[in-house]
Image (spheres, rainbow, N blue to C red):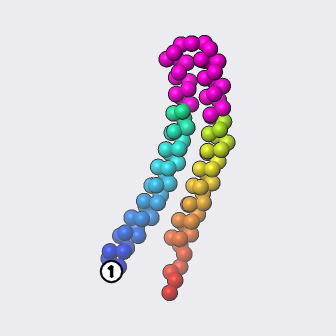
Amino acid sequence: MYPLIIPLEILGQFMRLISLSVRLYANMLAGHMLILTFLGLIFIIGNLLLAIIAVPAAAVFYLFEVVIVVSIQAYIFAALSAIYIGSAIEPEHH
């Protein structure tokens, strides 16, 4: 049974790291794409009134992303990393 469990356990450890990395990257990318979308509306529509609305809205979303979303993601990333490392070095229960 060990020849089946050992490769799966090793693969599981690497997949945890990959899933954390992809999760962090996707959240950062989504926030930045939202900001770029708001700023891109200025050039697409070409309206000064829209620019007056879009720039502050983009700034508000950027601050929301930095303060709330990034802080929560950093906390989750650190907590899950600590849990994964703790479970990897924890001695086996008999």
Q: Residues within 10 Å of mark 1 (few under 14, many from 20)?
A: few
Q: Main secondary structure of the magenta part?
A: helix
**Residue at screen point 59% across, 50% down:** 73
- Reply above or below: 92 against 59: below
**Could you say which is closer to the camera, residue 94 or residue 69?**
69
Residue 69 in the figure: left or right of residue 14: right
Where the N terminus falls, by quadrant?
A: bottom left
Residue 37: in magenta span: yes
**Residue at screen point 39% across, 64% down:** 11
Amino acid at circle 1: Met
**Which range of residues does the magenta coloring cover?**
35-62
- Reply above or below: 56 against 15: above
Q: Position of residue 50 (x, y in %)?
A: 59, 17
**Residue at screen point 53% across, 13% down:** 46
Q: How many marks?
A: 1
Label 1 residue SS: loop
**Residue at screen point 65% across, 44% down:** 68
Q: What residue did someone put label 1 on?
A: 1
Q: Position of residue 84 (x, y in %)?
A: 53, 65
Residue 58: in magenta span: yes
Q: Position of residue 39 (x, y in %)?
A: 56, 24
**Could you say which is closer to the camera, residue 48 or residue 67?**
48
